[in-house]
Amino acid sequence: MLLITIFMTLIGISSVNVALPSIRQGLDASQSDLQWVLSGYVLTFGVVLVAAGRAGDIMGRGGLFLTGVGIFTASSVAAGLAPNPEWLNAARFAQGIG
């Protein structure tokens, strides 16, 4: 199960790189919006990672793991349904938290 989540993390980063031209055209995103789409996920992922690991030690890894997968999945759906760049960036930040 852990390998699947590591795979999801890598896919979350690399698939967006491939989709940037489509995101720019489909959402009429600026260059700044596209940079935030890429870096917002990685930034929140990196900031939350240590605190989430400690929270898992305190509250139990299993429940926190499933909560994180749920947040990641729900925010992935929200990112896929994004009507504008702001919505997409908010969903990507939520993905990083998940």
Image (cartoon, helix red, strand yellow):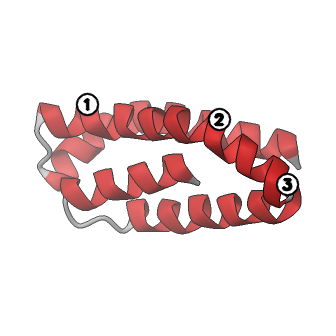
Q: What secondary structure is marked by label 3?
A: helix
Residue in front for this viewpoint, 89 or 61: 61
Q: Quadrant of residue 64?
A: bottom right
Image position, residue 36 (x, y; %): 27, 37
Taking the image as shown, residue 33 lies to the left or right of residue 42, namely left
- Amino acid type assigned to the residue bearing label 3 in the image: Arg
Image position, residue 83 (x, y; %): 23, 67
Taking the image as shown, residue 42 lies to the left or right of residue 52, namely left
- Amino acid type assigned to the residue bearing label 1 in the image: Gln
Instruction: Give the mark toward the camera: 1 or 3.
Output: 3
Crowding around mark 1 (Cα neighbors within 10 Å: few <14, some 14 to 19, many 20+) is few
Rounded to the nearest angstrom, the CA distance separating label 2 from label 1 is 24 Å
Task: Identify the residue shown where x is 27% and y is 46%.
Answer: 23
Q: Which residue is mark 2?
A: 50
Q: What secondary structure is marked by label 2?
A: helix
Relative height, residue 79 to residue 53 (above, below): below
- Amino acid type assigned to the residue bearing label 2 in the image: Val
Closer to the chain start, of discs 2 and 3, is: 2
Taking the image as shown, residue 15 lies to the left or right of residue 30, namely right
Q: What secondary structure is marked by label 1?
A: helix
Q: Which residue is mark 1?
A: 35
Q: Which residue is mark 3?
A: 61
Residue in front for this viewpoint, 8 or 65: 65
Rounded to the nearest angstrom, the CA distance separating label 1 from label 3 is 32 Å
